[in-house]
C-alpha cells in the first residue's frame, strides 16, 4: 500500500477507478480536461492516489483555481475526486492523501483548499472548517423536476428516499409552484430596464475583457471571487468536453457589463453556471435591473432547451450573492434551503493578512465546478 | 477500369478521405485494389485485392452472414463461393468468410462487393419496382433488404472499412487485417431540422387536434380532451414549443459543440404545404448563428415541378439573402431516378432526402455522402447525397422505449467501421408536451453522440470537406 502523487501513466487507471465506483462513462479526454489545467504551470498534478500494488484504490485531487480580491490574484485548490474503495475505508488513507495535497499546496503557492461536500465529518478530521451550508435558487418548469431532484438526493444518500405518496405530493406542490413562478416571471418581464443601449449577445469566444470585469466586480462588491479571465473561461466553458455552458453577455454599446452562463445537465436540470456583472453607478440602470435581465435570459434559454427546472447556488451573504438571490426571488425563483456544505482549509496562515480563510466574503458560482456544468 | 467501377472507386476514395486517416487513404490509393472480371480475379498471381465487377446481383439479398471485424460485426450478402481452382483459403474462416486469399497473395472478396455497392448507390432496388406509397415515395417496406433485415446495415461503410484493413494488412505482412488500428476517424453526426411547422396555431394543425379529441369516441373510447388544451395553448401562444424551440435546440447543440442545418419550408400552404407561411422565416433567421447552415425544405407541390420549385427557391433566396446550397424534401418526396438531376439543375449541391419516412435505415447502404451516378454520362452528377438515416418520430414509433439504445447501436457500429449518420429532428418534436414520448429524446441522443466521441458536421460542411 502506498500513497503518492499521480504519475502520468496512471491517468487512465484513475479515471477507470472513478467510472467503476460511480458507474459513469467519463472518457480520458474528459478526465484530462478536469485535472490537467492549462493555466497552472506545474506538470505534476495535485492529485494524490492510494496504490495497492498496481491498482488504484483511492484518489484525492485539487483543481488549481485563481481567485481575485481587492489585493490581486492568487491560487487556491478546489478539492475534487475524493474517492476511496469501500474496502479500504477506516484505515487513514483519506487523511494521508489530504496531507499529501496540503504539502503540495504549500509548496506550490495554493493559499487554501476549498470544496463542497456532504461528508463534512470526514473532512473535519482532515482539518477542514465548515463555514456554511449552501442553499439553492430554483425555477421549476415541470413537475418532472421533482423526480430529478429526488433521484439526485437518493443517489447522494445511497438509498431510495422516494416514497410514491411523498413524491406525488412533491409533484403536486411543484406543479403549483410552477404556475406561480410563471405568473411572477411574466409580471417581472414588464419591469425590465429601459434597454436603450443594452444588448445581450451569445458569446462564441471568451471576451478579452473578462478579467477586467472581475477586477471591477471585486472593487464594487468587495470580497473574493473566481478570476474568470478569457483563458479561464476558455478552459472551463468553451473547451468543456462535457457540456459547454451558453454564455449570454450584456453589453452597453461595446462595454462588457456582465454575463450569465447556463447549461442543461444530462438529467435535464438547467444549471445557472455563472452570473457576474459590474455596473458603473452613473448608468441609467441598476445592478438589480441587469441581474433581472440576465436571469430572464437564463430562464427562457433553459426552458427552451427542455429543462425541467433551472437552479443555481446561493452560497453565503456576499453582497452580490444576496442581491442575486433577492432579484431571483422577485423573478419567480424559490430559495431552497438544502444544499452541500462548503469546506475550507487555509494553507498559508499567520503572516499574510489577507482573509484567505474567511469564506463569508466569497462569491462563487458553479463556474468552478468539476466538470459537467461549467 | 469500366465507368461503373471508376465511379464506385471514386466514391470509395471520397468516403475514405472523410472517415479514415490520411494513411488509410494512401494505402487505398497505393494501387492494391483492382476492379476486374471474375475470371481475372481468380487467376491469382498479384498481391492485390481483386474485385469482380461482372457478377450478377440477385434481386433479393441471398445468403446473409456476419463476420467479426474491428469490434463490430460486418453483415454480408450475395456470397461468392471460394474458387475451386487454385490454392485459396477463407479469411477469417470458411463458414463466415470475408475474403479468399490465394497463396500468391491475391485477395478476393467473399461477397459481391462491387455489385452490391453499385446497386445500392444507384438506387437499383428502387428501379426494379413501380411500387410507391400515396405520396409517390419508395417505402422501406418495398425494399428487398427490409425483409432480409438489412436496412440498418451500412453496407458501403462496412465494405470500405474491410478494404482499408485489408490494404493495411497486405502492406504490412501480406495478409488481410480484421481491425482498423488508428486508421479510423471518429464517427460523424449530421444534424438537421425540418422547419415545416413553426407556429402551432395554423388551421390544419388545430384541425388535426380537434379530430384527435373526437376520434376515440368513434371507437367507443373516451375523447382525448388534452388536445383541447393544446388547441387553446397554441391559439394564445402560437410560438410555444415550435418557433421557441429553435433557439433551445441551438443552445443545446452549442453545449455539445455541435452544429446543424435548418431546412426552411416556404411557398404554398395547405395540409402538406408550408402551414406556418413564409413570413415567420424572416423572424427565424436572426436566431440561427454563424456555423449553422440554412437550406431549403422542398415544398410538397414542388416535387419534380420546375416552375413551382423555381418559385419556392427564388422566394427563399430573397428571404435568406444567401445562396441556398442544400435541401431536403418535405415528406421525403424523392424519385430515385429524377430528383437528383432535377435538384442539380437548380444548383443544389447537397441533398438529404434519400431516407425512409417509415423506418430508420440506410436507404443507399451508406452512412456518409456520395455523388449519384449519371447513366447517360457514365459518371457522377455534380450534386452530393447525404442520405437521411434517422428521423425523430420514426425512431420512436419503431423502437419506442428502446429508441436511444437503437440509436446508440447504429452510431456505435459507425464508430467501428467509419461513417456519418444523418439525423433529422423537427422543432415541434423537440420539446413539446403534446408529444410526451419525445421529451428529452434529442438531448439523450446528443449525449450518446458525445459519449461515442462523434464529431458534428452539417451536410454541406461534410461535402465541402470531401470536395476540398
Image (tube, rainbow, N blue to C red):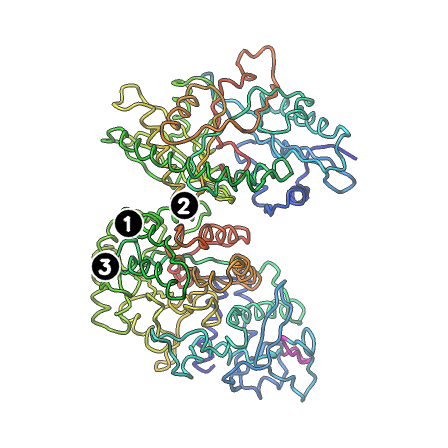
For label 3, the SS is: helix
Assess disc 3: are there few (<14), some (14-19) or many (≥20) residues with their C-alpha within 10 Å of its C-alpha: some
Q: CA distance from mark 1 to mark 3?
A: 26 Å
Q: Quadrant of residue B370?
A: bottom left
> How far apart in space, not on screen, are marks 2 and 1 (Cα)?
18 Å
**Residue with the mark numbered 3:** B317
B234 to the left or right of B68: left
Badge 1 sits on which subunit? B
Marks 1/3 same chain: yes
Q: Residue at x 40, y 69 (%)?
A: B354
Work out whether B165 lies above or below A244. Answer: below
- Mark 1 highlights which residue? B238
**What chain letter is assigned to the residue under label 2?**
A
Which element carries disc 1, helix, strand or loop? loop
Same chain shared by disc 2 and disc 3: no
Q: Chain of mark 3?
A: B
Res A75 seen here: yes
Q: Is residue A291 above or below residue B113?
A: above
Q: Position of residue B273 (x, y in %)?
A: 27, 64
Q: Residue at coordinates 55% horizontally, 24% vertically from top-left?
A: A133
Q: Which residues are magenta?
A: B98-106
Q: Which residue is mark 2?
A: A305
Amino acid at each position: 500500500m502506498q500513497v503518492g502523487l499521480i504519475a502520468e501513466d496512471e491517468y487512465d487507471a484513475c479515471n477507470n477507478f472513478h467510472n467503476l465506483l460511480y458507474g459513469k462513462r467519463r472518457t480520458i479526454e474528459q478526465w484530462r480536461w478536469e485535472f490537467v489545467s492549462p493555466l497552472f504551470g506545474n506538470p505534476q498534478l495535485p492529485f494524490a492516489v492510494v496504490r495497492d500494488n498496481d491498482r488504484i484504490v483511492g484518489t484525492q485531487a485539487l483543481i488549481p483555481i485563481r481567485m481575485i480580491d481587492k489585493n490581486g490574484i492568487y491560487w487556491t485548490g478546489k478539492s475534487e475526486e475524493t474517492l476511496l474503495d469501500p474496502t479500504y475505508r477506516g484505515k487513514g488513507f483519506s487523511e494521508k492523501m489530504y496531507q499529501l495535497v496540503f504539502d503540495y499546496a504549500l509548496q506550490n503557492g495554493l493559499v487554501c483548499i476549498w470544496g463542497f461536500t456532504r461528508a463534512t465529518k470526514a473532512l473535519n478530521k482532515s482539518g477542514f472548517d465548515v463555514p456554511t451550508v449552501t442553499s439553492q435558487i430554483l425555477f421549476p418548469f415541470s413537475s418532472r423536476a421533482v423526480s430529478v431532484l429526488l433521484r439526485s438526493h437518493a443517489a447522494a444518500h445511497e438509498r431510495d428516499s422516494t416514497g410514491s405518496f411523498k413524491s406525488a405530493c412533491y409533484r403536486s406542490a411543484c406543479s403549483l409552484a410552477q404556475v406561480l413562478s410563471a405568473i411572477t416571471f411574466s409580471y417581472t418581464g414588464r419591469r425590465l430596464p429601459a434597454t436603450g443601449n443594452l444588448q445581450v449577445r451569445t458569446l462564441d469566444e471568451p471576451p478579452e475583457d473578462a478579467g477586467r470585469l472581475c477586477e471591477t466586480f471585486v472593487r464594487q462588491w468587495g470580497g473574493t471571487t473566481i478570476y474568470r479571465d478569457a483563458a479561464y473561461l476558455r478552459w472551463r466553458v468553451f473547451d468543456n468536453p462535457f457540456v459547454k455552458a451558453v454564455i449570454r453577455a450584456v453589453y452597453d454599446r461595446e462595454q462588457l457589463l456582465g454575463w450569465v452562463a447556463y447549461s442543461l445537465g444530462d438529467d435535464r436540470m438547467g444549471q445557472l453556471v455563472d452570473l457576474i456583472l459590474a455596473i458603473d453607478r452613473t448608468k441609467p440602470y441598476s445592478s438589480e435591473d441587469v441581474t433581472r435581465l440576465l436571469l430572464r435570459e437564463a430562464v427562457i434559454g433553459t426552458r427552451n432547451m427542455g429543462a425541467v427546472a433551472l437552479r443555481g447556488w446561493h452560497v453565503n451573504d456576499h453582497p452580490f450573492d444576496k442581491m442575486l438571490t433577492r432579484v431571483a426571488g422577485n423573478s419567480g425563483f424559490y430559495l431552497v434551503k438544502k444544499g452541500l456544505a462548503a469546506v475550507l482549509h487555509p494553507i498559508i496562515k499567520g503572516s499574510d493578512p489577507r482573509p484567505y480563510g474567511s469564506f463569508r466574503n466569497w462569491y462563487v458560482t458553479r463556474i468552478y465546478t468539476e466538470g459537467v456544468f461549467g | 477500369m469500366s465507368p461503373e467501377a471508376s465511379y464506385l472507386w471514386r466514391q470509395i476514395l471520397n468516403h475514405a478521405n472523410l472517415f479514415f486517416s490520411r494513411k488509410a487513404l494512401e494505402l487505398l490509393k497505393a494501387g492494391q485494389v483492382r476492379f476486374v472480371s471474375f475470371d481475372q480475379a481468380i487467376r491469382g498471381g498479384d498481391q492485390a485485392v481483386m474485385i469482380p465487377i461482372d457478377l450478377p446481383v440477385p434481386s433479393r439479398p441471398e445468403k446473409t452472414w456476419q463476420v467479426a471485424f474491428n469490434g463490430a460485426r460486418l453483415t454480408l450478402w450475395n456470397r461468392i463461393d471460394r474458387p475451386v481452382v487454385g490454392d485459396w483459403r477463407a479469411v477469417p474462416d470458411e463458414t463466415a468468410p470475408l475474403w479468399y486469399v490465394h497463396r500468391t497473395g491475391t485477395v478476393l472478396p467473399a461477397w459481391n462487393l462491387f455489385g452490391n455497392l453499385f446497386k445500392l448507390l444507384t438506387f437499383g432496388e428502387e428501379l426494379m419496382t413501380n411500387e410507391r406509397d400515396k405520396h409517390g415515395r419508395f417505402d422501406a417496406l418495398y425494399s428487398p433488404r427490409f425483409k432480409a433485415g438489412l436496412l440498418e446495415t451500412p453496407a458501403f461503410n462496412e465494405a470500405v472499412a474491410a478494404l482499408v484493413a485489408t490494404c493495411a494488412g497486405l502492406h504490412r505482412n501480406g495478409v488481410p487485417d480484421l481491425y482498423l488500428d488508428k486508421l479510423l476517424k471518429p464517427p460523424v453526426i449530421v444534424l438537421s431540422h425540418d422547419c415545416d411547422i413553426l407556429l402551432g396555431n395554423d388551421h390544419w394543425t388545430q384541425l388535426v387536434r380537434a379530430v384527435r379529441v373526437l376520434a376515440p369516441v368513434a371507437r367507443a373510447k373516451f375523447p382525448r380532451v388534452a388536445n383541447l388544451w393544446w388547441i387553446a395553448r397554441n391559439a394564445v401562444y402560437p410560438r410555444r414549443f415550435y418557433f421557441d424551440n429553435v433557439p433551445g435546440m441551438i443552445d443545446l447543440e452549442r453545449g455539445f459543440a455541435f452544429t446543424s442545418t435548418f431546412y426552411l419550408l416556404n411557398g404554398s400552404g395547405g395540409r402538406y404545404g408550408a402551414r406556418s407561411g413564409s413570413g415567420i422565416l424572416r423572424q427565424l433567421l436572426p436566431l440561427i448563428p454563424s456555423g449553422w447552415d440554412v437550406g431549403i425544405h422542398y415544398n410538397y407541390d414542388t416535387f419534380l415541378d420546375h416552375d413551382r420549385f423555381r418559385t419556392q427557391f427564388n422566394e427563399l433566396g430573397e428571404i435568406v439573402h444567401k445562396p441556398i446550397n442544400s435541401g431536403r424534401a418535405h415528406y421525403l418526396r424523392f424519385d430515385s431516378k429524377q430528383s437528383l438531376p432535377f435538384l442539380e439543375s437548380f444548383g443544389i449541391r447537397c441533398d438529404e432526402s434519400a431516407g425512409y419516412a417509415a423506418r430508420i435505415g440506410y436507404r443507399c447502404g451508406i452512412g456518409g455522402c456520395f455523388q449519384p451516378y449519371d447513366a447517360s454520362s457514365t459518371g457522377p452528377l455534380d450534386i452530393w447525397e447525404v442520405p437521411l438515416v434517422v428521423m425523430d418520430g420514426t425512431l420512436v414509433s419503431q423502437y419506442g422505449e428502446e429508441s436511444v439504445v437503437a440509436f446508440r447501436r447504429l452510431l456505435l457500429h459507425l464508430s467501428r467501421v467509419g461513417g456519418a449518420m444523418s439525423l433529422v429532428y423537427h422543432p415541434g418534436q423537440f420539446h413539446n408536451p403534446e408529444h410526451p414520448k419525445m421529451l428529452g429524446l434529442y438531448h439523450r441522443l446528443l449525449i450518446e453522440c458525445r459519449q461515442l466521441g462523434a464529431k458534428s458536421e452539417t451536410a454541406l460542411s461534410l461535402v465541402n470537406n470531401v470536395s476540398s
